[in-house]
Each structure stands twice: as C-alpha cells, then as structure tokens.
Image (cartoon, grey):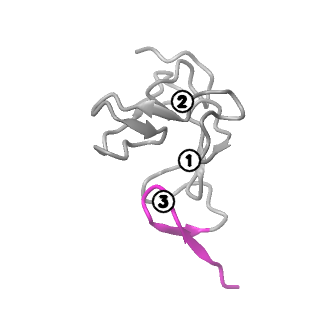
C-alpha cells in the first residue's frame, strides 16, 4: 500500500504522514507547531497558546529580535532548546521553560 509523505515544517525532510518525529531534525511535531510549555498545537497567527496562555512570540536571547516560539530562531538560526537536567529524561526543552514539558521536573539553569 502506498503511503504519502509530507515535508517537516521545521527542516523540509519528507516524512510519513503518521510519523511522530522527524527523522532528520528530531522534531516531535513535524507537521505543525506545538507550544513549548504545554505541547498543545499552536499556529503562527496566534498571540498566546490556548492551552496555557504563554506568549507565542518571544525575544530571541541571541539576536534580540521578536520571533515565533520554535526550536530555532527564524532570524539568526540560534538554538532555543536546552536539555532537561533530569538524568532520567534529558529531552530537549524550550529555553524559557521552568519545568520540563515531558517529565514535569524543575529545570536547573
């Protein structure tokens, strides 16, 4: 049975439509964007996340420009992710998160 592939919105790699992760960039939302705090789906036309109320547009810590909250800055390509400090988790987290969106533990900075 033929399956259709779609490009990852983060890197453009073609992935199976039912993929949970992008094989190239590792995104856990290859066909859309998710809130970095609560992981609910968000779109670029929103001002705040409907799930938790976090601002969807933030200031990049590297270039100081207003950007969409994603894994990298749309202007300088700076990485906006940090590693969860919980040794059992270690999943990438948005740099502004206080608690890990996966395991819920407080992130030590």
Q: Name the residue under label 3.
A: 23
Magenta-drawn stretch contains 93? no
Between disc 2 and disc 3, whose residue precedes?
3
- x, y (%) of residue 33? 58, 48
Helix, strand or loop at mark 3:
loop
Q: Residue at x 56, y 48 (%)?
A: 28
Q: Give the range drawn in magenta.
A: 1-16
Which residue is at a point 54% across and 29% down the rendered structure image? 89
Q: Where is residue 86 in the image (x, y as percent from the top left)?
A: 51, 22
Query: Image height check: is 25 above or below 90?
Result: below
Question: Real-space Cα distance between discs 2 and 3?
Answer: 20 Å
Residue in the picture at 31% in, 30% down = 64
How far separated are the C-alphas under marks 1 and 2? 29 Å
Looking at the figure, which quarter contains the N terminus?
bottom right
Q: Kindly identify which residue carries mark 1.
A: 44
Crowding at mark 2 (Cα within 10 Å: few <14, some 14-19, many 20+): some
Q: Which of 20 and 39 is in front in this view?
A: 39
Q: Which label lies toward us, 3 or 1? A: 1
Name the residue tied to disc 2: 89
> Sequence order check: which comes first, mark 1 or mark 2?
1
Quarter of the picture containing the C terminus is: top left
Taking the spot 65% from the left edge, 34% from the top edge, the residue there is 49
Q: Are marks 1 and 2 in contact (CB under 8 Å)?
A: no
Outermost residue, bottom side: 1
Q: Which mark is residue 32?
A: none
Q: Earlier in the sequence, mark 3 or mark 1?
A: 3
């Amino acid at each position: 049975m033929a399956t259709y592939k779609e490009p990852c919105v983060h890197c453009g790699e073609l992935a199976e439509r039912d993929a949970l992760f992008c094989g190239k960039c590792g995104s856990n939302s290859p066909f859309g964007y998710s809130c970095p705090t609560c992981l609910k789906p968000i779109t670029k036309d929103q001002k705040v996340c409907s799930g938790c109320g976090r601002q969807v547009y933030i200031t990049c810590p590297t270039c100081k420009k207003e950007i969409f909250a994603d894994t990298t800055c749309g202007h300088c390509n700076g990485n906006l992710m940090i590693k969860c400090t919980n040794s059992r988790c270690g999943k990438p987290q948005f740099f502004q998160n206080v608690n890990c969106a996966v395991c819920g533990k407080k992130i030590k900075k």
